Amino acid sequence: MVNIQEALAEVNAAAAARPDGVKHAPIVMEAVLEAGALRALAPYLQEKGYGEVVLVVDANTWEAAGKQLAANLEAAGAAFRVCTLAPNSQGDVIADERTIVQLMLEAPLYVQALVAVGSGTIHDIVRFVCCQTGRDFISVPTAASVDGFTSVGAPIIVNGVKVTVPAIAPCAIFADLDVLAAAPQRLTAAGFADMLGKFTSLADWRFSNELAGEPFCPLAYELTEQALASCIEAVDEISRGSHAGVAILMEALLLSGWSMLLVGHSRPASGGEHHLSHHFEMAYLKEGRRQLLHGAKVGVASVLLAGLYRERLADAYPGIYGELPQPDLLRAWLREAGGPADPADIGLADALIAEALQEAHKLRDRYTGLKHLALQAEGAAG
């Protein structure tokens, strides 16, 4: 089993040796990735001297880990309160204005630390509130479902539009393999799909550097590429949701998050496939539909984009887009992991896909293959 704290030390050592493109000082973060990691939270809180903390959960994550954490803290004599985030009318907890205000109202300012017990959405809400109010942010993932646990960006829905705002990374993360392995396979598959999206995000990063001169960090690129490769090699274990499989996946997700921390933005892990995913999400919110898992959207978007890039850009940029896996191979990996692979699997209509391919690049000021193709189409139409 990997020692995740040693893995972080290796990342910091590599960044010190190869500082080109690295924006941050060494990453300081307590990291525990092992079976029984939940038990390490109470001693950590006592060591830090927090008078009281808030466990931020939803109904599902309370059952997955919150209840056990609360029992552990109570047994240790650690003071805490619980904030159970309320779902919207469709039954989803959304990182929007309403939920952010709920947490701010239920987390008094004298509380020094907030503990995010959940997956991506709960982490985004907590990291934003902690950043805005000067509190420490502690991460307890309940599924290996996204790579954003250790990143600084918080994707927030504001007036129905998804914007990524600067926030803070956790000062500590406690990832319990018992909890992660017990999560529904669709959540593990979503984490695998989020990692699979690095094929197109890394290609887009190289493309933006070559065509638009956007900053590039070879180390962050290589670390993300390494994390992606480890997931592909372990797809059998990941598809079984075994302790070994979720350990490899979670390490990859953490490494991807640390790569983003090194450069101070999400460029290594987020390209056109994430822009498509965000567009799909906003459309579903506007239509009042149930939300899809972030990774599920990213996986489907990656298949779409890989096919488009290979068809439209591989001849002109063979060293970038010509090296992408064939869409059928991406589909096979996604299905093996237990996740959706095609638009029909997640209810995406052709009209929405066409709209997203033309409009989604406007969500972020980044030059990607998606933006390049959309601008070409606009020029041809004009």
Image (cartoon, helix red, strand yellow):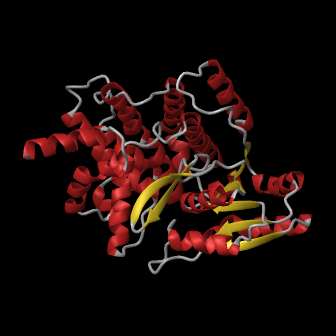
Q: Position of residue 83 (x, y in %)?
A: 68, 73
In front of the other: 239 or 72:
72
In front of the other: 325 or 91:
91
Residue located at (67% from left, 70% from top) = 62
Q: Position of residue 17 (x, y in %)?
A: 64, 18
Residue located at (74% from left, 37% from top) = 5
110 above or below 177? below
Q: Is residue 238 left or right of residue 171?
A: left
Q: Position of residue 252 (x, y in %)?
A: 57, 39
In front of the other: 274 or 21:
21
In front of the other: 102 or 228:
102
Quarter location, residue 376: top left
Residue located at (37% from left, 38% from top) = 200
155 above or below 257? below
Q: Which residue is farthest top?
A: 17
Q: Position of residue 379 (x, y in %)?
A: 12, 42
Q: Is residue 1 visible?
A: no
Q: Is residue 118 left or right of residue 54?
A: left
Residue located at (34% from left, 58% from top) = 279
Query: How many numbered marks does the figure carry?
Result: 0
Quarter location, residue 261: top right
Q: Is residue 120 visible?
A: yes
**Quarter of the image containing the N terminus?**
top right
330 above or below 100? above
Q: Which residue is farthest bottom?
A: 89
